[in-house]
Image (spheres, rainbow, N blue to C red):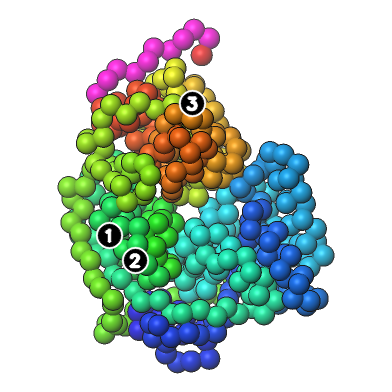
Amino acid sequence: MTLIEKILAAHTARKKVSPGEFANIRVDLILANDITAPIAIREFQRIGVGKVFDPAKIVMVADHFVPNKDIISAEQAKLMRDFCSRREIRHFDVGQMGIEHVLLPEQGLVLPGDVVIGADSHTCTYGALGAFATGMGSTDIAAAMATGDIWMKVPATIKLVYHGTLGKWVGGKDLILYTIGSIGVDGALYAAMEFSGEAIDALSMDGRFTMANMAIEAGAKAGIFRVDDKTLDYVKSRAKRPYTVYEADDDAEYASVIEYDVSAIEPQVALPHSPANTRPVSQVSDVAIDQAVIGSCTNGRLEDLRLAARVLKGRKVHPRVRCIVLPGTQQVYLDALKEGLIEIFIRAGAAVSTPTCGPCLGGHMGVLAEGERCVSTTNRNFVGRMGSPKSEVYLANPAVAAASAVTGRITSPEEILIKPKATKSKGL
């Protein structure tokens, strides 16, 4: 069996599962947020059961419209809060504030070998930890909260092997954009994407989270990495319960195996209006921007903020550009504060927000007007994704977003580094 099949089989009454089979699968963790939880709660109440199957295995995070932007979003959060209180669900807004897919791994709530479902498509982020994690609809979440099980078709696995050494300013965001550009937004439809190869072994955990996060943008059911020493180092200080590490069998059968040589890959940019519409940054010129967003569940971790700060340090955001920085959690915010990154952002002229999904879904904290363009480290650039249907979103890594904020157009960080830094103003 493949890695995904091993994990799923261990959560059924069977010894083996195969792609295409339907199975009842026990879950280790269920997630919902302030957009999807209210629907799941209403459906749960229609089922008529008095209790959730296990209050310790349910997590609800208000992150899309926080701090609450209006009465409706406040009512959504209140509904979640009341439900958690009545059902004794203690994992509500864990860590006080954070973007769910950054927060849960940070808090040790997801561990290797888990089966995790979430009422959010980017739940696949947790595959970076060697877990099977996938997004489902709110009605599926309601049923799982009642029973502890899901019923699903076992996905086939596509193995992606990345050879070579990553160049400067190239990371997980560039690898996954390059991959989606190569196979298309339906290239892994209902499959699991298993990431491997020496370039993946060298990738940081933050880079792996980014890649797993965007597996859904290739149509995948899940993205997953094998557990190695980096994974174990990440979880050992966070884990509060036992977990199991699974390995694919040597004779596992894959739907396909795709190999890449990453040595020549540049930072990638996804042009409107698809994550698959990718080009090297050197081929994207004369694209003026009005806004740059650095953050989200895709690139709101400490490593991402460090990259952006390296580019912005001693420089100024272009006067035409709004640069918005969104740490993924309060802990990321605090760590960035201790390292001096927040000061770098503010001195550069960026706005630093409390953790929120906000602008990623066109919710708040950075909605685009008609005709505006944004370069963003988020995961989607569909029509109207961040505001007006007549706006444009370009996806890139944090270094490219930061460099573009300085020049006012989509720019490689290499171009920024060869130019002199801005002179400090008096009083700063």
Question: Which comes sooner in the sequence, label 1 or label 2?
Answer: 1
* Mark in the foreground, 2 or 3: 2
Q: Residue 247 at x, y = what percent?
A: 37, 78
Q: Residue 12 at x, y = what percent?
A: 52, 86
Q: Which residue is mark 1?
A: 183
Q: Which residue is mark 3?
A: 322
Which residue is situated farthest in the top direction here? 426
The amino acid marked with disc number 2 is Ala
Q: Residue at x 37, y 67 (%)?
A: 189
* Mark in the foreground, 3 or 1: 1
Q: What number is the disc on residue 148?
A: none
The amino acid marked with disc number 3 is Arg
Q: How many marks?
A: 3
Q: Is residue 105 magenta?
A: no
Kindly report the distance in space between the C-alpha atoms of the residues bearing marks 3 and 1: 33 Å
Q: Residue 417 at x, y = what percent?
A: 28, 26
Residues under numbered marks 1 and 2 in contact, where contact means CB atoms less than 8 Å apart = yes
Quadrant of the image occupied by residue 319: top left
